[in-house]
Image: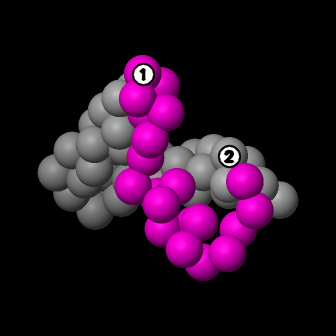
Amino acid sequence: MTVDRYLRLIAGFFVMLSVALGYYVHPGWFFFTAFVGLNLFQSAFTDWCPMMTFLRKLGVRS
């Protein structure tokens, strides 16, 4: 898998996890959902995401 596919997988997992935590644990977890969405939004314009840097350092191919 490539960095882009891993990035979408991780972002989707974080969104689903934070929505579940916000619903079942505490509504404050929805701020994490907003953070992930904001990060995806800015990465669409800048083509950079902190997770991409982390994945490349782990050796995931571009």
Q: Residue furthest toward the left?
A: 28
Name the residue located 54 percent from the left edge and 74 percent from the top edge.
57
Q: Does 20 sit left or right of 4 as displayed?
A: left
Q: Position of residue 16 (x, y in %)?
A: 51, 49
Q: Position of residue 45 (x, y in %)?
A: 42, 21
Kind of element beneath mark 2: helix
Q: Which mark is residue 1?
A: none
* Mark 1 or mark 2, earlier in chain: 2
Tell me the quadrant of the picture where the C terminus can be found. bottom right
User: What's drawn in magenta, residue-wise?
Assistant: 43-62
Q: Residue furthest toward the right?
A: 1
Kind of element beneath mark 1: helix
Question: Disc 1 designates what residue?
Answer: 45
- Which is the main secondary structure of the residues drawn in magenta? helix
Name the residue located 48 percent from the left edge and 68 percent from the top edge.
54
Which amino acid type is shown beneath numbered disc 1? Phe
Q: Nearer the viewer, residue 9 or 29?
A: 9
